[in-house]
Image (spheres, rainbow, N blue to C red):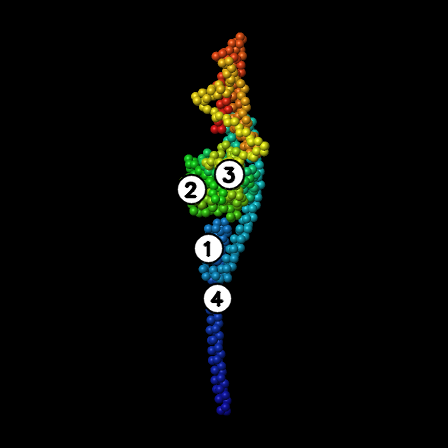
């Protein structure tokens, strides 16, 4: 009987201990669950913050960074903003976003190049048709100029031809920028003719002053004539447009160590440092030229210069200021693009400025060896014609002693013997005859013939009884005044000298 209460008490105590153990374990489980809930809440909050940060970065990428990256393709000076969170820059997310920007820039550049190439192809076709029409109009105007002699009509036709030339220059520049050929193939020409040819294509050509310091005969090879004319025309056009209308543009042609330089100085406002760098990049021709880089409307002059300098190995520099406060543009033509023409056989244009340099004196050539057995007789010396009163006395005395023989106290004229003619000059060494020399010789012949006819006596005035006139001399070919011979002899010299001058 006594054992049952003990057992019950023991069981009750054991149950109490088990209950306490289970309660403590339940408390621990609840605490662990609370901590886990707190961690889940913190992770959820962190995840929400990361999601909001990522969303902000994507929005910033789309709104700010991608447009800036696309604009940087065309404008190198633009800066692309970084991510919103600076700590994102070196993370995988930051690197992924940077890769997105690079891909966008590459695709924009590729599409831009493709679209620009299509635009250039379309403009090439249009300018080709425009150039052909302008060339036809130019031929028609020149035919009209040759057909009609009315001064007013000729002046109008010249003005229309000049306007047509300016339109043709603009179409040619647009075609060159779009990758077309220059359009004309010329023969070798004097460098000064190429410069004045470019000057003649401008509206303000009268404001351009050209100083030619080149050696006579300095010329360009055939394939460089038209490019040099186009470059000079565009540089002069910029100088005329950006300077006051009452100022002049000075052009100097000088020899340098590597060739020839054409220097153009204007008195305009000049350029800022950024404009100068951009202009130098364009004329250097190192970067590809796109129409979208040339503004709206596109300004194609410097771009055309850059394309020509790259194609024909020319050098243009616009990075310095002129002494007049404007811009100095220098075109350098290297020696391999230069040639030489004989200025006597093919002189420059009459309107081209004459060079300030004197031609080098010709070296004396050795006389040809005598092929005959005897010595070659020297030509008889020809006395130089005298002038003025002394000339009259000298020639009168010569006529009295050499031209006439005294017979019965009366002078009789005898035929003059021809002096020994000089040896003929070989055809290879004889200088070509200029048109001025031919005109002078023809004028001298006509003047001498007229003088001889005016000095000859009229047969109707001679007496029939044979009485000699003028001091007893008989009428005949020997009776005309020796001064007529003098005037006839002097006329060719005077005319030739005047023509040569």
How far apart, in angstroms, are the residues tagged by discs 1 and 2?
40 Å
Q: Nearer the viewer, residue 140 or 102?
A: 140
> For the residues carrying marks 3 and 1, which lies nearer the camera in this image?
3
Instruction: Of the two numbered discs 4 and 1 on the same chain, state the one appearing first in sequence.
Output: 4
Q: Secondary structure at mark 2?
A: loop
How far apart, in angstroms, are the residues tagged by discs 2 and 3?
26 Å
Residue 153 visible in this rendered orientation of the protein? no
Which residue is at a point 49% across and 19% down the rendered structure image? 401
- Where is residue 193 drawn, in percent x and y? 51, 36
Instruction: Of the two numbered discs 3 and 1 on the same chain, state the one appearing first in sequence.
Output: 1
Residue 287 visible in this rendered orientation of the protein? yes
How far apart, in angstroms, are the residues tagged by discs 2 and 4?
70 Å
> For the residues carrying marks 4 and 3, which lies nearer the camera in this image?
3
For disc 4, the neighbor class at 10 Å (few under 14, some 14 to 19, many from 20) is few
In this view, 185 is above or below 92? above
Q: Quadrant of residue 118?
A: top right
Instruction: Of the two numbered discs 4 and 3 on the same chain, state the one appearing first in sequence.
Output: 4
Q: Nearer the viewer, residue 180 or 56?
A: 180
> For the residues carrying marks 2 and 3, which lies nearer the camera in this image?
3
Q: Nearer the viewer, residue 76 or 13?
A: 76
Q: Secondary structure at mark 1?
A: loop
List the single residue furthest toward the right.
372
Q: Which residue is mark 1?
A: 81
Q: Which residue is mark 3?
A: 218
**Label 2–label 4 contact, CB within 8 A:** no
For disc 2, the neighbor class at 10 Å (few under 14, some 14 to 19, many from 20) is some
- Where is residue 42 drawn, in percent x and y? 47, 66
> For the residues carrying marks 1 and 2, which lies nearer the camera in this image?
2
Which residue is at a point 46% across and 51% down the rendered structure image? 78
Q: Which mark is residue 322?
A: 2
Q: Which residue is mark 4?
A: 43
Which residue is at a point 46% across and 55% down the rendered structure image? 81
């Amino acid at each position: 009987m006594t054992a049952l209460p003990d057992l019950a008490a023991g069981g009750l105590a054991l149950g109490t201990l088990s209950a306490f153990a289970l309660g403590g374990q339940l408390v621990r489980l609840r605490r662990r669950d609370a901590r886990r809930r707190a961690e889940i809440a913190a992770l959820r909050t962190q995840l929400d913050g990361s999601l909001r940060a990522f969303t902000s970065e994507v929005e910033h990428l789309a709104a700010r960074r991608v447009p800036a990256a696309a604009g940087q393709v065309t404008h190198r000076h633009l800066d692309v903003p970084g991510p919103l969170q600076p700590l994102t820059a070196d993370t995988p997310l930051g690197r992924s976003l940077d890769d997105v920007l690079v891909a966008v820039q590459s695709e924009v550049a590729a599409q831009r190049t493709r679209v620009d190439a299509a635009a250039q192809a379309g403009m090439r076709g249009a300018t080709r048709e425009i150039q052909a029409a302008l060339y036809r109009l130019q031929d028609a105007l020149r035919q009209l100029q040759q057909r009609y002699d009315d001064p007013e009509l000729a002046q109008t036709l010249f003005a229309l031809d000049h306007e047509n030339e300016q339109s043709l220059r603009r179409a040619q520049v647009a075609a060159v920028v779009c990758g077309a050929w220059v359009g004309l193939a010329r023969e070798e020409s004097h460098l000064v003719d190429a410069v004045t040819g470019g000057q003649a294509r401008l509206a303000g050509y009268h404001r351009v002053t050209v100083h030619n310091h080149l050696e006579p005969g300095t010329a360009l090879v055939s394939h460089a004539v038209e490019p040099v004319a186009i470059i000079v025309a565009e540089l002069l056009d910029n100088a005329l447009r950006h300077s006051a209308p009452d100022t002049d543009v000075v052009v100097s042609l000088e020899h340098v160590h590597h060739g020839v330089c054409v220097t153009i100085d204007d008195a305009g406002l000049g350029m800022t440092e950024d404009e100068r760098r951009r202009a130098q990049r364009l004329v250097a021709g190192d970067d590809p030229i796109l129409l979208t880089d040339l503004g709206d409307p596109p300004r194609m002059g410097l771009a055309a210069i850059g394309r020509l300098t790259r194609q024909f190995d020319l050098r243009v520099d616009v990075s310095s200021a002129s002494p007049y406060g404007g811009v100095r543009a220098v075109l350098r033509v290297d020696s391999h693009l230069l040639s030489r023409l004989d200025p006597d056989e093919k002189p420059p244009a009459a309107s081209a400025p004459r060079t300030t340099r004197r031609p080098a004196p010709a070296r004396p050539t050795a006389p040809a060896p005598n092929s005959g057995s005897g010595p070659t007789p020297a030509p008889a010396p020809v006395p130089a014609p005298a002038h003025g009163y002394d000339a009259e006395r000298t020639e009168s005395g010569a006529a009295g002693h050499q031209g006439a023989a005294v017979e019965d106290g009366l002078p009789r004229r005898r035929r003059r013997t021809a002096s020994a003619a000089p040896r003929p000059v070989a055809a290879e060494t004889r200088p070509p005859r200029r048109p001025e020399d031919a005109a002078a010789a023809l004028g001298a012949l006509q003047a001498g013939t007229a003088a001889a006819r005016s000095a000859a006596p009229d047969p109707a005035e001679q007496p029939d009884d044979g009485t000699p006139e003028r001091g007893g001399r008989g009428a005949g070919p020997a009776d005309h005044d020796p001064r007529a011979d003098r005037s006839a002899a002097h006329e060719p010299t005077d005319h030739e000298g005047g023509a040569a001058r």
